[in-house]
Amino acid sequence: MRRAVPALLVLSSLVSTASSQSHPPPRPAFRFSPEAGRTLTRLWQTSVAARQERVACLASTVRNDTVFVSRILPLEAEGADSMGIGSSESIRRCGPPEWSGTVHTHVAMYSDSLPSTLFSAQDRGVMRRWYQRWHSDGVFCLLYSARDAHCEADGVVGGLRSRPTIVR
């Protein structure tokens, strides 16, 4: 029995070392001000009622390992359909220094119970165009239910934001 204990400890430490190496670094946490939360709720309700995606500008700050979303500015949904919304206006309007990126809704059902909970290839293309326009770190979210969002912040590594270069 005495021999089994050290072997189990070694096996345990190898498993924990291997699992820690296979996990990606922690992602930043996202927090929303009450005002931003209320605006996101209205954005979702409008999107569901129209059965069209909606988009808004997003203002945020980064402190330590947390992205604080302070304001949301809904944009008019000209040319929207159930799966897409024109992106040129959001790229033009939602840039630094006033805005950090965008938030949009996914309302078209991806499965029997939910819209897609992740950014689509088209979403990634819009994000790439945003970066090409602004040459800055960005914060992007998508709403896929009245209370759920998937958000990503680029340039936030270990709680530090890189210094963006803004192109006007």
Image (cartoon, grey):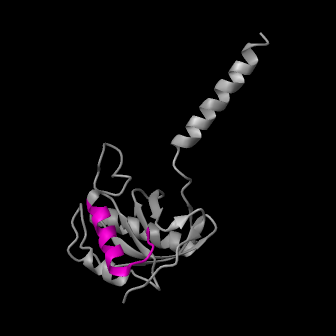
Percent x, y of residue 95 = 40, 81
- Determine the residue positioned at 59% across, 62% down: 158
* Magenta span contains residue 133: yes
What's drawn in magenta, residue-wise?
122-139
Judged from this view, the residue extending furthest toward the bottom is 168
Residue occupying image coordinates x 36% and y 67%: 104
Q: Residue furthest right?
A: 2
User: Relative to 2, is 57 on the left or the right?
Assistant: left
On the image, which quarter does residue 64 sit in?
A: bottom right
Identify whether 3 is placed above or below 142: above
The quarter of the picture where residue 132 lies is bottom left
Residue 114, percent from left and from top:
36, 48
Image quadrant occupied by the N terminus = top right
Quadrant housing the C terminus: bottom left
Q: Is residue 32 visible?
A: no
Is 80 displayed left or right of 157 in the figure?
A: left
What x and y, as percent, mark residue 128? Answer: 32, 69
Name the quadrant containing residue 9. top right
Residue placed most toward the observer, 92 or 25: 25
Observer-nearest of 17 and 71? 17
* Secondary structure character of the magenta stretch overall: helix
At x 34% / y 52%, what residue is drawn? 116
- With respect to residue 106, does 79 lie above or below? below
- Where does residue 96 sit, x and y in percent of width and height? 44, 83
